[in-house]
Image (spheres, grey):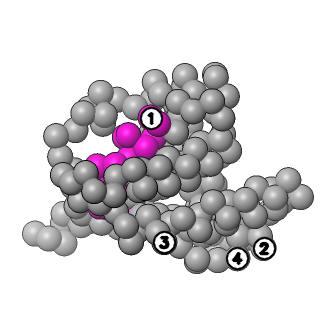
Amino acid sequence: MRYGRTTSLAIAEFREFAGFSPCEQRYIKRSLDIGLGRQDAFKLWARDAEESASIRSQYIAYQELKTLRRDMPDETAFEGIEAFVGKLIRVSAFDLAQERLACFSAYRFLYERLLGPEVRPWLPAAFCGAAALPQIRPGLRKELLQSISEAAATAPGWSDTAPSFYPEWVEKEAA
């Protein structure tokens, strides 16, 4: 039975990813390459000088990921919240300010993979906090904040099942 459940989860993750815009898909794959150290993002993703600069900034912002993975507080404790949530909001704000993630679902999909399933309880707060910052363009701020459902914002619990699908670059010839 476990095999069928894992397969169903993977298919659901494939479908969710397929529902994101091409821009969101590209940014998620690029971000996973940077955040998980899978590929040289400059060689793979930089199409021009502006994108190279964005990738360089993302490498710098994502230096916090190791600390976030290591220092994730227990979801019922208050110790360490300010340091963890502050860093998570800062990294999240960087990603949202890039204007390539247009909704909470794409953000959650990315961050579950960057930080693991343990981060799920913290994502609604970090997303709302980052999306509400003045660094986010007002029109985008409104769009982002409206994208989080009441169910996601008020979930009574979160799955601890690890993501099974990690999208990555595919060469055109291989596709």
- The one nearer the camera, 107 or 67, is 67
Q: Is residue 45 above or below residue 17?
A: below
Residue 25 visible = no
Q: Disc 3 vs disc 1: Cβ atoms closer than 8 Å?
A: no
Asked if residue 79 lies left or right of residue 53, the reply is left
Mark 4 crowd level (few <14, some 14–19, many ≥20, 10 Å Cα): few
**Which numbered disc, 4 or 3, marks the residue that appears first in the sequence?**
4
The residue to which callout 2 is attached is 43
Measure how far apart labels 2 and 4 are at the Cα level: 6 Å
Residue 137 vs 22, above or below: the answer is above
Q: Residues within 10 Å of mark 2 (few under 14, many from 20)?
A: few
Instruction: Check whether the beta carbons of the residues at disc 2 and disc 3 lie within 8 A of each other.
Output: no
Q: Which residue is mark 4?
A: 40
Which of the two residues, 127 or 81, is positioned nearer the viewer here? 81
Q: Are marks 2 and 4 in contact (CB under 8 Å)?
A: yes
Q: Secondary structure at mark 4?
A: loop
For badge 1, the amino acid type reads Cys
Q: Is residue 44 magenta?
A: no
Q: Which residue is mark 3?
A: 66
Where residue 31 appears, as percent x and y from the top left, is 60, 61
